Amino acid sequence: MLPLIPLVLSIAPEIGRWLFGSAGEATANAVVSAVQAVTGTNDAAASAQMLSANPEAAANLRVKLAEIAAGREKAMRDADAALLASQLSDVANARAQTVALASNKSAVQWAAPIVSVVVLATFGSVMLMALTRSLPSGSETLLNMLLGSLAAMTTSVVSYWVGSSAGSASKTELLYRSTPAADGK
């Protein structure tokens, strides 16, 4: 495959992103098969010579390579859609569990709100103390570590109650990649 890479990339550069990574080997095998089917050989020099002499064969190979790239793109979109569906299902299950606990008047329904209040109150208290009191010398590193941990917990609390911006960003990216551009590319 290595000798064919420059030839293949000169004909269909979009295939390059699929020649490496987890799908690289399968893509390379499909590319070699396509080159061999069109040119009758998998020798790079002979293939290049045949394709330069026969524009119809070059166009045929370009189509086959585009089909391979499109297939890889579709597989990636399908995997992303499955991952998003799984994440949304997980969130829906968590929300359904909370609703079920609340409707059954379970004491467990108060766990998330209590933990949230404790985390937010602790973060606020530590921030207030850090800003209004003098620190013992040498405790700055410990305070920074504590504030960093509490800030991460506070972010998790807010994400739990109002939703995760990371999930929103990945959903937006998935939608962007699944929408064809105006020029058809």
Image (tube, rainbow, N blue to C red):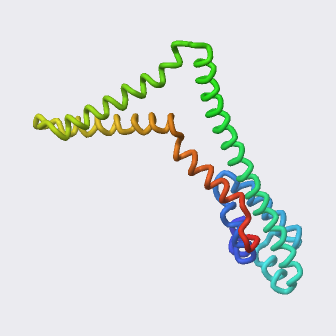
Measuring from the top left, give residue 174's x and y in whole percent: 65, 53
Query: Residue lying farthest bottom?
Result: 53
Q: Is residue 168 left or right of residue 48?
A: left
Where 26 sits versus 117, above or below?
below
Q: Residue at x 84, y 71 (%)?
A: 63
Image position of 21 with respect to 69: above or below: above
Q: Nearer the viewer, residue 104 or 171?
A: 104
Q: Quadrant of the N terminus?
A: bottom right
Horizontal side, residue 115 vs residue 170: left or right: left
Query: To which quarter of the image does residue 53 belong?
Result: bottom right
Q: Dividing the picture into quarters, in which one does residue 129 lie?
A: top left
In the image, is 108 to the left or to the right of 8?
Answer: left
Residue 59: x percent and y percent? 85, 78
Residue at x 67% of width, y 55% of height: 175
Name above or below for residue 140 compared with residue 169: above
Q: Residue at x 75, y 52 (%)?
A: 75
Residue 158 at x, y = what percent? 45, 37
Give 147 or 114, whichever is nearer the viewer: 114
